[in-house]
Image (cartoon, rainbow, N blue to C red):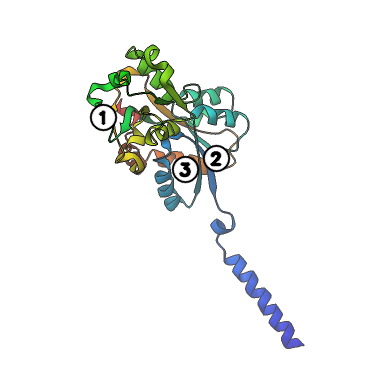
């Protein structure tokens, strides 16, 4: 009987030792939830993965149009950080007390391109004028009501005097990633999309693009901010700090983003 009692005590002590040996990171995993503009869907996963390796902090990513994400945050969505495709939405959240003004960070400048499939007969040397070609029945852009790239596309079309001529041929994606998918799938003959999507490995060999001159649309200055009610503020700040690192900036540059201080 005594031997059996000693055996069970040994088992209990061993179990307690194993529990106590679990590191704090394993017992209480650290994770931040990031709301990000859809143009970052090809670049932010790579940056987040590198950050996770160096910090031990997991990053949960949710992509959508910047305006749609702003509405979710206004309605109490439990995000820790918001990466917008413009500076307007983060500033709107700051003005509403939903985001921390001290953390506002302009992390990149996006670029708009005209994109079509690689085997398209359209000659991109002619730039925006290809949109007048009779073979172009559908032109994909992001919804300008929610997406900064959609507003940039409309501005560019108006800049070239084309908006009224081709407006009835526009098909709207809920975000810029969906607009790119419309062209990739052949549901649209051409699209005004983010350079980041044109350079994405999944699309790089499938299409060709023409950079829309920067003077044709308002700058796509992109900003990030920590959400005011974040329960993981320090980890969120750590991720924003990593976005300023040479490593993160190199990945952004690889996908066509420029730094705000390069303007």
Q: Is residue 55 left or right of residue 194?
A: right
The residue where tag 1 is placed is 121
The residue where tag 3 is placed is 238
CA–CA distance in space, label 1 to label 2: 51 Å
Q: Is residue 19 left or right of residue 115?
A: right
Q: In this view, does 83 lie above or below 247?
A: above
**Among the two numbered marks 1 and 3 on one chain, the one whose residue lies closer to the N terminus:** 1
Q: How crowded is mark 3: few (under 14 residues within 10 Å), some or many (20 or more)?
A: few
> Residue 171 falls in which quadrant of the image?
top left
**Residue in the foreground of this view, choosing between 3 and 136:** 136
In the rendering, at what x and y percent does residue 201 appear? 33, 43
User: Is label 3 in a helix, a strand or a loop?
Assistant: helix
Quarter of the image with the C terminus in it: top left
The residue where tag 2 is placed is 233
User: Is label 2 in a helix, a strand or a loop?
Assistant: helix
Q: How crowded is mark 2: few (under 14 residues within 10 Å), some or many (20 or more)?
A: some
Q: Is residue 256 above or below residue 128?
A: below
**Residue in the foreground of this view, choosing between 191 and 213:** 191
Q: In this view, does 98 lie to the left or right of 102?
A: right
Q: How crowded is mark 1: few (under 14 residues within 10 Å), some or many (20 or more)?
A: few
In the rendering, at what x and y percent does residue 204 appear? 31, 40
């Amino acid at each position: 009987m005594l031997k059996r009692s000693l055996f069970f005590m040994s088992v209990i002590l061993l179990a307690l030792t194993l529990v106590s040996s679990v590191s704090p990171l394993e017992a209480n995993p650290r994770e931040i939830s990031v709301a990000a503009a859809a143009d970052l869907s090809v670049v932010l996963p790579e940056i987040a993965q590198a950050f996770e390796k160096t910090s031990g902090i997991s990053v949960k990513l949710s992509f959508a149009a910047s305006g749609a994400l702003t509405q979710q945050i206004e309605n109490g969505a439990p995000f820790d950080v918001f990466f917008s495709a413009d500076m307007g939405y983060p500033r709107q959240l700051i003005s509403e007390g939903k985001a921390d003004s001290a953390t506002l960070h302009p992390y990149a400048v996006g670029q708009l391109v005209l994109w079509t499939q690689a085997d398209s007969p359209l000659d991109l040397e002619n730039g925006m004028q290809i949109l007048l070609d009779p073979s172009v029945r559908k032109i994909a852009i992001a919804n300008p009501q929610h997406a900064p790239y959609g507003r940039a596309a409309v501005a560019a079309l108006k800049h070239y005097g084309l908006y009224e001529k081709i407006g009835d041929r526009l098909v709207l994606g809920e975000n810029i990633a969906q607009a790119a998918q419309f062209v990739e799938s052949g549901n649209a003959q051409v699209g005004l999309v983010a350079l980041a999507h044109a350079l994405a490995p999944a699309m790089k060999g499938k299409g060709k693009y023409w950079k829309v001159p920067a003077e044709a649309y308002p700058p796509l200055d992109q900003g990030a901010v920590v959400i005011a009610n974040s329960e993981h503020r320090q980890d969120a700040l750590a991720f924003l700090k990593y976005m300023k690192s040479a490593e993160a900036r190199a990945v952004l540059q690889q996908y066509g983003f420029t730094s705000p201080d390069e303007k």
